[in-house]
Amino acid sequence: MRRIIITISTLMLLYGCSDLVDGINDDPNNLTTSSYQNILTGTEVGNILLQSGEAARRSGIFAGQYTGIDRQHQGYSQYAVTTSDFDGLWNDAYVNAYRNALITEQAATEENVGPVTIGITRVLQAQIIGTTASLYGNIPVKEAGVIEITNPVFEAQEAVYRDVQDLLDRAIADLSETTGRPVSGSDIYYNGDPQPWMEAAYTLKARFFMHTKAYDEAYDAALQGISTPANSMYGPHGTAADNSNLNYQFFAVEVRQADLVVSDFMASLVDPSPESPDPANYRGNAKTDETARFHYYFEKNSTGIQPNTEDGFAAQQAGSPLVTYEENLLILAESGYRSQGFGAGLDHLNTFRSFMDNGGYMTDANPEALLYAPYTEADFESGGIENPDGISRNDALLREILEERYITLFGQIEPFNDTRRTLNEAGVRVPIIPNRGDRLPARFLYPQSEIDRNDNIPSPIPDFFEPTPVNE
């Protein structure tokens, strides 16, 4: 494991968002002596990088949402990956995000700030480690934050998820005390407000219970999760070149924008036009019009279909979705169906559809292009508008919920988790077809940097198509 802890100011310079944290370190050569609030800001920026940067784009390729058309990204689409391709992504998780989250907690404890700040650091740690476990499987956790340990032990993925749930429980207990908020402005997600942090913690609990197929627990957690769009966790962005939305930087600024397009499959699901890559794949019907969502997500240019960098998903100042109200609603729909039955699943799906009918998470949606009318039980019966192929009513509802998650969580890591979690549920899973061969990607590879430095790397090293333990 790399033990170099770079300064937060250097991190921002390299990866953007620097204007959020100008002058963050009084002593740039000694991170641990910085005040907790400076490290907290840097941790949150590092988390944005992990959740919405290259790891998310790579996940989108492996989940069939993007297609690489040149250079490295073309290779990723053809599953031509090597261990060294993941060096930077591992560094994003462990150095830029997790290690700094641990140091934030240490600094806040030493400065006796109070429970809310400690709770925030623990939510961040859980979010970072849960995400990392979902991508790689067995990973170092307890020893990963100890600089003196050069060969940290890899812990079983199932055990990591249990530890993440415990960490979130501790964070919720801290946050419920409501005292000890961080200095104003240092928490760039919620400005130290414990209520949305608690709700985000519950939604993260629900997300990670979904990963392990603990649907009863996921439903119970989501009932206490993000309760309003205003409490969604978004990474903020600005108008400077180095603090712009990371997808904007990739698709509108950097020379790599020609490397990657939205896949024909993904675009066709929401493209109502005759010029769609596959008009027959459009999911609209008498109760659903996806025109507004297509224009929010995508734009057509000389390269192909790419994320909307003008006034939509990848606009310069667009917030990066990290943990959202819409995700919580769809966790309730899927876990509600799986644990409570058809009626609960349909009710929660219709709550989500009502949210979307009023614009949902789309910015400046044209009301005339919005239609998400409530579904009825009859719509999922054989021959109904959501069941033209005559599968069971229950399967038709689950299929619709899974497809809705796939579209709503576009550009995030979760669709890759969903495609692996539901791979064996033929007939209801989103029908991603491998770009090459007959197997879909099953994990991120352990990076060459870790293979070279850590004697505890799993042996044999799992390959790209070997499922992580929770997906076996």
Image (cartoon, rainbow, N blue to C red):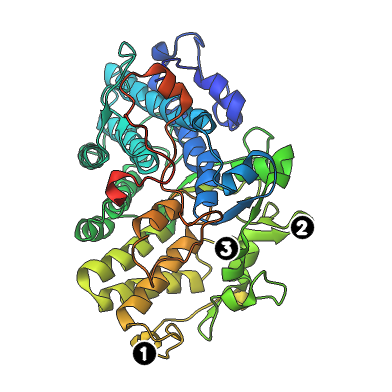
Observer-nearest residue: 184 or 410? 410
Q: State the residue at coordinates (39%, 56%).
A: 418
Q: Which type of secondary structure does the marked residue at label 3 adopt?
A: helix
| Amino acid at circle 1 | Ala
Residue where numbered disc 2 is placed: 301
Task: Give the alpha-carbon distance from disc 2 to disc 1, as whole Å.
Answer: 40 Å
Q: State the residue at coordinates (21%, 67%).
A: 339
Residue 469 vertical placement versus 147 (above, below) = below
Observer-nearest residue: 122 or 419? 419
Mark whose residue sits in front, 2 or 3: 3
**Could one spot residue 185 in this view of the protein?**
no
Q: How many marks?
A: 3
Residue where numbered disc 3 is placed: 266
Q: Earlier in the sequence, mark 2 or mark 1?
A: 2
Q: Position of residue 185 (x, y in %)?
A: 47, 33
Circle 2 residues within 10 Å: few <14, some 14–19, many ≥20:
few
| Amino acid at circle 3 | Met
Q: Position of residue 299 (x, y in %)?
A: 70, 60
Residue where numbered disc 1 is placed: 378
Q: State the residue at coordinates (39%, 13%).
A: 32
The reply to whether callout 1 and callout 3 are in contact (CB within 8 Å) is no
Q: Which type of secondary structure does the marked residue at label 2 adopt?
A: loop
Observer-nearest residue: 188 or 211? 211
Q: Earlier in the sequence, mark 2 or mark 3?
A: 3
Task: Give the alpha-carbon distance from disc 1 to disc 3, as whole Å.
Answer: 27 Å
Which quarter of the figure has residue 223?
bottom left
| Amino acid at circle 2 | Asn
Task: Give the alpha-carbon distance from disc 2 to disc 3, as whole Å.
Answer: 16 Å
Residue 23 horizontal side relative to residue 242, left or right: left
